[in-house]
Image (cartoon, grey):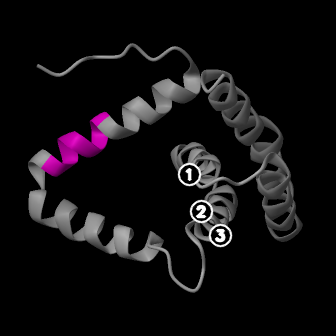
């Protein structure tokens, strides 16, 4: 029996919603999901660039494209790969320099909220 964990904050809820949605999509389109997941896993494997660097790049692209689920997911990915708050915020700064106000607005709200809530869970 699967243990259900009630999300305790908006960030955890967003990550949960993404996982549930991905699960439903995978049930309906298993072949497509399997290929997509294999491709994504290959892209994020350690290589010349570290997994941390790849997550920082993905966060920047997520901010630029205004994809809130990916902003949360890749902020968590940065943290999971050992990126410091300063490294995350520096990557955010580069994105804001390129992406302007829209990237900065997500950075000063959603990225900081995600880091705060995830860091509170780890303590």
Mark 2: which secondary structure? helix
Q: Are marks 2 and 3 in contact (CB under 8 Å)?
A: yes
Circle 3 Cα neighbour tier, 10 Å, few/some/many (<14 / 14–19 / ≥20) = some
Give the mark nearest the N terminus, 1 or 3: 3
Q: Which of 44 and 9 is in front in this view?
A: 44
In reply to whether residue 51 is colored magenta, the answer given is no
Q: Which of 94 and 42 is in front in this view?
A: 42
Q: Please give left or right for residue 43 compared with residue 48 in the image.
A: left
Q: Which residue is drawn at 11% across and 57% down?
A: 30
Tell me how far mark 1 sits from mark 3, CA to CA: 10 Å
Q: Nearer the viewer, residue 71 or 41?
A: 41
Mark 1: which secondary structure? helix
Mark 3: which secondary structure? helix
Q: Do the residues labelled 1 and 2 touch (CB within 8 Å)?
A: yes
Q: Name the residue under label 3.
A: 53
Q: Residue at x 68, y 30 (%)?
A: 119
Q: Name the residue under label 1.
A: 77
Q: Please give left or right for residue 33 compared with residue 50 in the image.
A: left
- Give me the disc on residue 55: 2
Q: Please give left or right for residue 29 compared with residue 70 in the image.
A: left
Q: Residue at x 52, y 44 (%)?
A: 69
Give the mark nearest the N terminus, 1 or 2: 2
- Which quadrant is the C terminus positioned in? top right
Vertical comparison of 88 with 116: above or below? below
- Give me the disc on residue 45: none
Q: Please give left or right for residue 104 compared with residue 4 in the image.
A: right
Q: Give the range drawn in magenta.
A: 20-26
Give the image location of residue 98, x and y in percent.
83, 71
Tell me how far mark 2 sits from mark 3, CA to CA: 5 Å
């Amino acid at each position: 029996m699967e243990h259900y964990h009630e999300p305790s904050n908006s960030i955890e809820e967003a990550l949960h919603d993404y996982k549930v949605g991905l699960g439903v999509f995978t049930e309906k389109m298993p072949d497509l999901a399997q290929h997509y997941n294999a491709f994504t896993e290959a892209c994020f494997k350690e290589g010349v660039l570290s997994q941390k660097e790849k997550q920082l790049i993905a966060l920047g692209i997520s901010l630029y494209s205004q994809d809130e689920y990916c902003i949360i997911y890749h902020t968590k990915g940065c943290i999971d790969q050992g990126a410091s708050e300063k490294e995350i915020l520096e990557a955010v700064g580069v994105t804001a320099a390129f992406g302007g106000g829209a990237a900065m607005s997500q950075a000063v709200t959603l990225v900081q909220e995600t880091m705060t809530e995830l860091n509170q869970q780890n303590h």
